[in-house]
Amino acid sequence: MSHRRGLLIILSSPSGAGKSTLSKRLLAWDPAIRFSVSATTRAPRVGEEHGREYYFHSHDDFADMVARDQMLEHATVFGNSYGSPRGPVEAAINAGQDLLFDIDWQGGQQIRNSALGKHVLSIFILPPTMAELERRLISRAQDEADVIAQRMQKSRDEISHWPEYDYVLINDDLDESETRLRTIIEAERMRLSQQPGVVDLVRRLNAEFEENQ
């Protein structure tokens, strides 16, 4: 039987719900999962390489890729554009490589509605309570109080999009959430749309059955 197709794993959550930590754990758990490399119009920072951290493009080239439907999703943030190039994603699917997308609900919606949407596994991560979400943001000690307040305000809008996802995980315990996440991915890898060789196998089974009649 031919190899399975790769999954496009979309993880979304409000800031502080545990998405980044769970993403890192997934990558450590299974080398068959890797981060999808995005394209951007911003300039490379020191130490960054084209094709590793990002695919770096000029504004004109990026706009041309969008016009030719070569971006699965894209958005403009603070004057720079970001997006997921179609070509590398299609190659990964065909090679049986799972790609992890750490994007918001808008980017996830664009990918789900694309021609590759049937290969998407979308998971939304919720905090157990808003008080716990705020506690986690404060404990990170990365933001000032006003930034934390802005993140909390934004989280309400982000959480409202949970029904659009295939699965919802309540991250009340990190280890248990990781276990549930692994279970979901292992099951979804067996989805019929991810196993192109099943059709040929069934044909061979039917042929064997006819030969033995």
Image: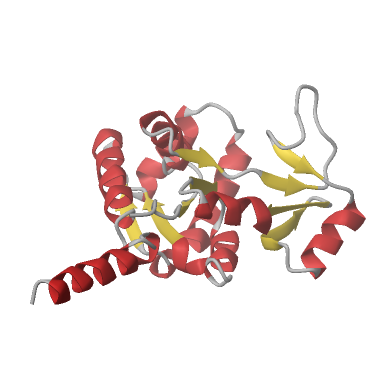
Looking at the image, residue 6 sits to the left or right of residue 92; the answer is: left
Q: Is residue 186 above or below residue 46?
A: below
Whole-percent x, y for residue 134 in the image: 44, 41
Q: Is residue 172 visible?
A: no
Looking at the image, residue 145 sits to the left or right of residue 11; the answer is: right
At 43% from the left and 59% from the top, the residue drawn is 122
Looking at the image, residue 2 sits to the left or right of residue 14; the answer is: left
Give whichever of 164, 148 is nearer the camera.
164
Looking at the image, residue 4 sits to the left or right of residue 83; the answer is: left
Q: Is residue 92 visible?
A: yes
Residue 37 appears in which quarter of the rendering? top right
Residue 105 appears in which quarter of the rendering? bottom right
Q: Is residue 132 above or below residue 31?
A: below
Q: Is residue 53 above or below residue 205?
A: above
What is the quadrant of the C terminus in the image? bottom left
At 32% from the left and 69% from the top, the residue drawn is 199
At 85% from the left and 61% from the top, the residue drawn is 63
At 82% from the left and 42% from the top, the residue drawn is 42
Whole-percent x, y for residue 30 in the image: 38, 34
What is the quadrant of the N terminus in the image? bottom left
Whole-percent x, y for residue 26 in the image: 40, 36
